[in-house]
Image (spheres, helix red, strand yellow):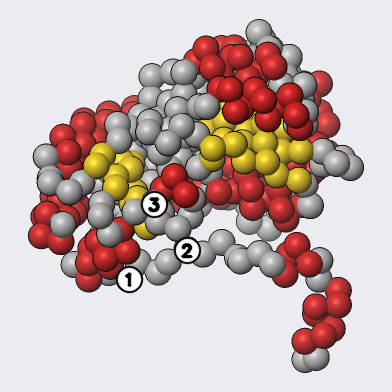
């Protein structure tokens, strides 16, 4: 094919991007993607398979996904007066939001470092993106810089990950509320890691007319289903709904998620175990000379070493895959991120880390 044909017609902004890369873990212990490491027992899997056998694959799924919406409302304590939209993971919801608010000259703003898809999706849809650096020492919001940026750019859309990825910390609630009050446009609180934290803004939805809350079932142990939820006033969601593709939640996801949330106690037990293991892992990592660790309210831990690429490659050679954040943002120099795995996986990671550092 003539390459000029491609470059003539593809938007320059798309040509300059790199596709989102997901490394092949091979046989390595996979601690790079904030996944729940636990599976279901055989009996529960058999019950789930029996549910899937009822799926009419020749028919389109319920376009409104009523059953799973109701289950999610209950589990995630969505206020009855608020509406809900579902997406293929949070990623699709972020894209729907950006498409809806992407008027001429409109700005999408977020603190950095944070979830990379805020910037990437803004670039894909052609929306101007503004990143505001967090405080370098503790990764808290730099409120002076945030409020100044909001005043300067008057953003149509602000994303706040709470707890934040990849730093793991939860921002101060008073700071978040100040940003909501000061922002002229829409503020979306991304609570992907809510199962591992103690605070949520779901109950604040009726307090602020420009607030939406986003959740996912991925970190609960259902990452393979790709299911996210956006909650908020119907006036906002009715407009965002127009950018949702028809039948976006397939029938196997609807049946599987409904079944899983009917057995939410299993997922909740796993979540509590991850919280306990996070505390143990954090303590043991802090005791290693040459490792700087930050507290986490998520299911991962951010840490800094003298030479992150060397440590990352050394761990990989020892059969442990984590996330190398060095080079992704100035504040993440020589930083790595490890997902909390099973006790056995965590021990293998710690053993290799000690030897390499």
Q: Position of residue 27 (x, y in %)?
A: 27, 69
In the current view of this chain or complex, which residue is farthest to the top?
207
Q: Which mark is residue 26?
A: 1
Give the Cα separation between the discs numbered 3 and 1: 27 Å
Q: Which mark is residue 22?
A: 2
Which quarter of the rendered picture does the C terminus lie within? bottom left
Compared to residue 97, the image places residue 6 above or below, namely below
Residue at the image point whose x is 59% and y is 14% from the top: 177
Is residue 10 visible in the rendered image? The answer is yes
Q: Secondary structure at mark 3?
A: loop
Q: Position of residue 285 (x, y in %)?
A: 17, 42
Q: Earlier in the sequence, mark 3 or mark 1?
A: 1
Q: Position of residue 263 (x, y in %)?
A: 39, 31
**Callout 1 environment at 10 Å: few (<14), some (14 to 19), or many (20+)?**
few
Give the foreground label among 3 and 1.
3
Give the foreground label among 3 and 2.
3
**Callout 3 environment at 10 Å: few (<14), some (14 to 19), or many (20+)?**
some
Which quarter of the rendered picture does the N terminus lie within? bottom right
Name the one closer to the observer, 255 or 321: 321
Give the Cα separation between the discs numbered 3 and 2: 21 Å
Q: Secondary structure at mark 1?
A: loop
Q: Are marks 3 and 1 in contact (CB under 8 Å)?
A: no
Residue at mark 3 = 333
Is residue 263 visible in the rendered image? The answer is no
């Amino acid at each position: 094919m003539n390459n000029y044909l491609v470059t003539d017609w593809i938007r320059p902004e798309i040509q300059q991007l790199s596709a989102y890369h997901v490394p092949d873990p091979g046989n390595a212990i996979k601690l790079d993607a904030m996944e729940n490491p636990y599976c279901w027992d055989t009996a529960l899997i058999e019950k789930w398979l029996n549910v899937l056998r009822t799926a009419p694959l020749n028919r389109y799924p319920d376009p409104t996904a009523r059953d799973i919406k109701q289950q999610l409302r209950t589990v995630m304590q969505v206020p009855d007066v608020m509406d809900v939209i579902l997406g293929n993971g949070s990623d699709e919801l972020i894209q729907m939001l950006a498409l809806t608010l992407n008027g001429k000259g409109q700005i999408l703003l977020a603190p950095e470092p944070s979830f990379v898809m805020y910037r990437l999706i803004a670039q894909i849809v052609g929306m101007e993106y503004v990143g505001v650096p967090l405080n370098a020492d503790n990764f808290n919001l730099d409120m002076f810089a945030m409020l100044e940026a909001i005043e300067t750019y008057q953003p149509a859309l602000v994303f706040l990950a709470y707890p934040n990825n990849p730093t793991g910390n939860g921002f101060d609630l008073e700071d978040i509320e100040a940003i909501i009050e000061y922002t002229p446009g829409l503020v979306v609180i991304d609570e992907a890691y809510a199962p591992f934290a103690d605070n949520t803004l779901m109950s604040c939805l009726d307090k602020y007319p420009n607030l939406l809350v986003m959740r996912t079932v991925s970190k609960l142990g259902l990452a393979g289903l790709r299911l996210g939820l956006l909650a908020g006033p119907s006036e906002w969601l009715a407009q965002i709904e127009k950018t949702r593709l028809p039948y976006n939640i397939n029938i196997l996801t609807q049946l599987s998620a409904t079944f899983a949330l009917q057995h939410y106690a299993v997922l909740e037990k796993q979540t509590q175990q991850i919280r306990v293991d996070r505390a143990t892992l954090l303590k043991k990592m802090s005791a290693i000379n040459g490792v700087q660790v930050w507290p986490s309210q998520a299911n991962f831990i951010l840490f800094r070493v003298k030479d992150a690429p060397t440590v990352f490659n050394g761990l990989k050679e020892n059969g442990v895959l984590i996330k190398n954040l060095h080079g992704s943002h100035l504040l993440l120099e020589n930083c790595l991120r490890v997902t909390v795995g099973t006790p056995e996986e965590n021990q293998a990671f710690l053993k290799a880390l000690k030897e390499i550092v």
